[in-house]
Amino acid sequence: MLQSFQPVLERIAEEMAGLAVRGRPADYIPALASADPRRFGMAVAELDGTVYGVGDWQHPFSTQSVTKVFTLALSLAREGDALWEHVGREPSGNPFNSLVQLEYENGIPRNPFINAGALVVTDRLHRLTGDASGCLLDFLRAESGNQDLGFDRDVAASETERGDRNAALGHFMASYGNIVNPVPTLLREYFRQCSIAASCADLALATGFLARHGIRADGSRLLTRSQAKQVNAVMLTCGTYDAAGDFAYRVGLPGKSGVGGGIIAVVPGRCTLCVWSPGLDERGNSVAGVAALDRFTTITGLSVF
Ligand code: GLU
């Protein structure tokens, strides 16, 4: 077993600096479009909270869909299996913001990581807590130990301005009775959630409960061992847009990506990772991020397979 992940991270960062194709940042809102695709950061957190990092690993970036993992865990912890009556757990085979499947599946989204599914999960969490985005932020602050984590108001405002499709998803599911809060309230909570800025170090630490089989940083239990397994399994099968098969093939770990260029990944019982580089491939996953995780599991042999 490796004594320290630092040499591996440095080797990967050096390899990634030479990557010829880096992809393009998401351009649907200005804050993401202006990100520099040459930026690269990567962090590994061990179960005890020891963190190793390289490059821009302490630089905050827009977490976007990476937060869907945490809202899922927070909802599942409160609602248990009843959550699965409102959202499925199968890959969708459709784009993350697609409407088509929802109609012939009666307003029940395929999984918690497409936008429709994440809206349902946020709706459930808001119903149970009255403050879904605040609950998420508190959790991320506690697990990362970084009290400075916060919402990026500009990103949240831009998301709202460009939010027609998410609004359509929300209203459509409300028509099937699968959304309980007023749709504008739900959208506010969802866009706040997407706007949270955090670094690779913060997110690697915040993901730790999934490597510790449900145990939080302070030793308390968030999820049962079985629920932690379930969240990891949904990440593996649905966590990286329409490329989850390719991600599993290349990386061999549960992972979740976001259009800000971040990806979190879990080695159950061993460590968690977060990598960030804003250039995306045509599926919406960070090019250097996937390549770096591929190299990590290849070099270390740490994967779930
Ligand atoms: N804010 C984005 C949306 O809902 C999240 C996109 C993503 O990271 O997948 O459209």
Image: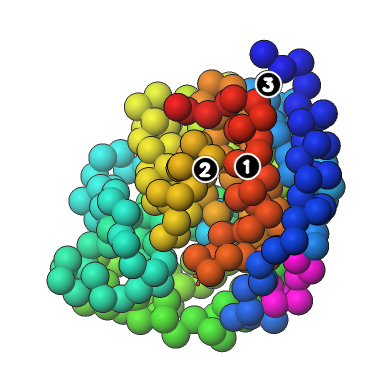
| Crowding at mark 3 (Cα within 10 Å: few <14, some 14-19, many 20+) | few
Mark found first going from the N terminus, 2 or 3? 3
Residue type at tag 3 = Asp
Where disc 1 sits, the SS reads helix
Query: Which residue lies at the image location 82% right of the left edge and 52% below the top edge?
Result: 17
Quarter occupied by residue 234 = top left
- The reply, left or right, for residue 292 in relation to residue 253 is right
Q: Which residues are magenta?
A: 31-37
Give above or below for 205 relative to 119: above
Mark-to-mark CA distance, 1 and 3: 21 Å
Above or below residue 216? Residue 99 is below
Horizontal side of 10 relative to 1 (left or right) equals right
| Count of residue discs | 3
Mark 3 — residue? 48
Viewer-nearest residue: 117 or 233 = 233
Residue identifier under label 1 = 293
Please provide percent x and percent y for residue 299.
Answer: 67, 29
1 or 3: tag closer to the N-terminus: 3
